[in-house]
């Protein structure tokens, strides 16, 4: 048994012991399930949480005159976290494949978006492609890691799961529009409507503790996009990247960006669903 499976089996045993000691009725049962949900979500967010900690920590204490630029330190640290998670089996190779795809998809978009001035990376670095430091790919990978780990940890099951080919078409259109709207009409409103039509009927069932709980998949995608928006505010505060409007000082990222993160969530979900295509837990 891998270390990950041993650790998760240990967590399950501990949870059952805590349940026996704590749960005495519906109220304490609800509270226990709520806490269990939070713990599982934190476990799913492990890579993303560590990345945010590195961004904020280096922003606060990294020496300005260090021979290794801060961005390169972040990239090497992220690579070390990734390697450690694989070595300790805290992350599966299946999840690592998703993360690699996110690196490629995200880095290509970053190269284009920085070239057209959508955002900038204000600090120097050696490890970069064009104006894009290599650590940026890990920020996209954190999203993929979270979805893939949540799928496994929360034991996802779906009802009325949309055909994967249809999701793929939508994801491709979303990705193209991220580039094309700089020259052609922005079709994001049509993409929002299409996303609602495709994912609206689908129900996601997840297991925070013992019982399965339902959630509309569309609502789940919106909620994750909202939390990514919160994380983006922390990232720009730490000057991991900045928008042109933040050049004279930090301010919260516009809530309008929530729409962009929702569209990115569609791409993210489809990539993870493609990995799970042989066992999507769908009915």
Image (cartoon, rainbow, N blue to C red):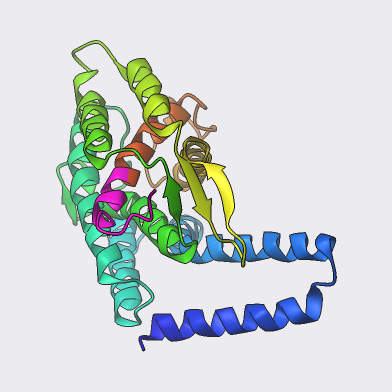
Q: Residue furthest front?
A: 283
Q: Residue furthest left?
A: 130
Residue at 29% across, 57% down: 276
Compared to 48, does 110 lie above or below? above
Residue 176 at x, y = what percent?
Answer: 19, 27
Indicate the quadrant containing the N terminus: top left, top right, bottom left or bottom right: bottom left
Compared to 134, does 20 lie above or below? below
Q: Quadrant of residue 197?
A: top left
Residue 229 at x, y = what percent?
Answer: 49, 39
Q: Quadrant of residue 245?
A: top left
Residue 89 at x, y = what percent?
Answer: 34, 79
- Is 81 or 63 nearer to us in this picture? 81
Residue 140 at x, y = what percent?
Answer: 32, 49
Q: Residue furthest bottom?
A: 1
The verdict on residue 281 being magenta is: yes
Figure disc tally: 0
Residue at 30% across, 28% down: 118
Q: Is residue 51 visible?
A: no
Task: Locate residue 241 relative to residue 75 in the image: left or right.
Answer: right
Look at the image and give the residue range highlighted in magenta.
Answer: 270-283
Task: Locate residue 13 relative to residue 55 in the image: left or right.
Answer: right
């Amino acid at each position: 048994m891998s270390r990950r499976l041993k650790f998760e089996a240990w967590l399950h045993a501990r949870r059952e012991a805590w349940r026996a000691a704590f749960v005495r009725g519906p109220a304490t049962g609800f509270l226990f399930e709520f806490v269990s949900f939070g713990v599982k979500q934190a476990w799913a967010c492990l890579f993303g949480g560590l990345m945010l900690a590195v961004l904020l920590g280096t922003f606060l204490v990294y020496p300005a005159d260090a021979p290794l630029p801060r961005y390169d330190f972040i990239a090497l640290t992220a690579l070390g976290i990734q390697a450690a998670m694989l070595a300790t089996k805290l992350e599966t190779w299946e999840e690592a494949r998703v993360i690699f795809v996110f690196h490629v998809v995200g880095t290509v978009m970053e190269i284009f978006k920085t070239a057209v001035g959508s955002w900038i990376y204000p600090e120097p670095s050696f490890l970069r492609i064009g104006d894009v430091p290599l650590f940026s790919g890990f920020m996209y990978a954190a999203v993929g890691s979270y979805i893939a780990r949540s799928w496994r940890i929360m034991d996802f099951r779906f009802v009325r799961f949309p055909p994967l080919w249809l999701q793929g078409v939508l994801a491709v259109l979303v990705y193209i529009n991220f580039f094309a709207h700089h020259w052609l009409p922005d079709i994001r409103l049509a993409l929002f409507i299409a996303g609602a039509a495709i994912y609206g009927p689908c129900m996601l069932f997840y297991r925070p503790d013992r019982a399965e709980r339902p959630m509309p998949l569309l609502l789940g995608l919106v909620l994750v996009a909202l939390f990514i928006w919160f994380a983006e505010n922390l990232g720009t505060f730490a000057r991991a990247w900045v928008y042109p409007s933040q050049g004279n000082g930090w301010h919260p990222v516009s809530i309008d960006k929530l729409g962009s993160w929702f569209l990115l969530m569609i791409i993210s979900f489809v990539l993870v669903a493609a990995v799970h295509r042989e066992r999507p837990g769908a009915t």
